[in-house]
Amino acid sequence: MSAVLPVARIRRRHRLRTLVVALVGVVVCVTLLLMTFGMGAAGVPPERSFPALFGVGDRFDLLVVRDLRLPRGLAAIVAGIAFGLAGALFQSTLRNNLASPDILGISGGASLGAVTAVVGYSASGTTVNLAACAGALGSAVLIWVLAWRNGLHGIRFVLVGVGIAYLSSSLVAWRLSEAELREAGTVLLWTVGSVADIRDGTLGIFTAGVVVLVLLTVPIAREQRALALGDEHAQGLGLGPTRSRVAALLIGVGLVALATSVAGPVAFVALVSPAIARRLVDDGGPALIGSAVIGAALTITSDVVGQYALPGGITAPVGIVTGLVGAPYLLWLLARSERKATS
């Protein structure tokens, strides 16, 4: 009985920390979303933006709040949720902190699909989104086929994914060299990530898809903790490691495909968010809820910074800002891994 009580207290503490992290992340997202209504040269002050949010006000206020700022902010939040949750699923399933969709080439595959549709077929709108989604899924299938050897092994999956990422990057560069000047702006956004051009119809479909995949994550959430401890531990708990790993990776690929098809390859959100969440929650598990919420907060914060807080009045897409934040973390993570390997 005495051993059960400490375990119960630890679990309550971890649940409380998860709840606090989630609530703080939600508050940050909502606060920044509301603040964007009044930012910039076309900003609408609070006494007019809040009524406009509910359809009350003049045409200019409604245009800025409901047609421009709200869809953009919601797209950043939903894309951040998808990237953060996908990163947590990849890292816990493959037991590798470097197992991020952008490093593994899945986001690169989406960029290749979108750029090919624009440059090769002069596509636009929903067609480009579908091409990006197909590119992400195609990259995932290719990685899967090449990495499968009597089962799915984390190290091989990561190594093959890095190779596919380089291949996708090279093909995107080749496509860029063929692009005409009028296509350059559109193509560029698909190489860095942006939520600037979001429409209500696209946002609704995108959000619905992410919600469905998030709900599918709920039944496998407990399995993720066992997978993070190794296949033998998972088998001892009655789980099929290969089946559980395949299910988690399929959901992760779906999340990345949806997010990248709308926002482009927003760099490093899927890599950084799970790391921050695991440190804040500190329960030794994958921290799926924390990763999703922190991914949302990181993405909308980066978008706000890129639009309104850079020096000199310049603006930058969200993917540029997340890249500036995530690149130093990746270098630190590699250096830390190297020190562990040599110690």
Image (cartoon, rainbow, N blue to C red):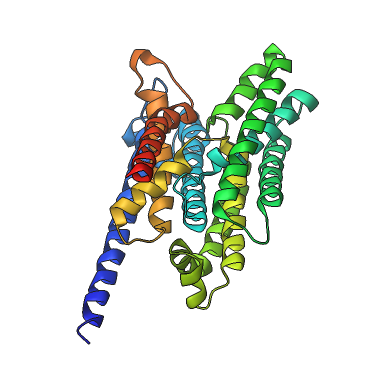
Q: Residue at x 52, y 55 (%)?
A: 94
Give percent across and percent down for residue 128: 70, 34
Give percent across and percent down for residue 263: 56, 36
- Depicted 191 relative to depicted 217: above or below: above
Tell me if 65 is positioned left or right of 339 in this view. right
- Position of the N terminus, as image quadrant, is bottom left
Tell me if 269 is positioned left or right of 112 in this view. left
Give percent across and percent down for residue 187: 64, 24
- Position of the C terminus, as image quadrant, is top left
Figure quadrant of residue 18: bottom left
Residue 43 in sight = no
Q: Residue furthest right?
A: 121
Q: Residue furthest front?
A: 342
Q: Residue furthest left?
A: 2
Give percent across and percent down for residue 47: 32, 36
Q: Residue at x 35, y 53 (%)?
A: 278
Front residue of 184/67: it is 184
Tell me if 326 is positioned left or right of 259 in this view. left
Figure quadrant of residue 300: top left
Front residue of 140/273: it is 140
Front residue of 275/159: it is 159
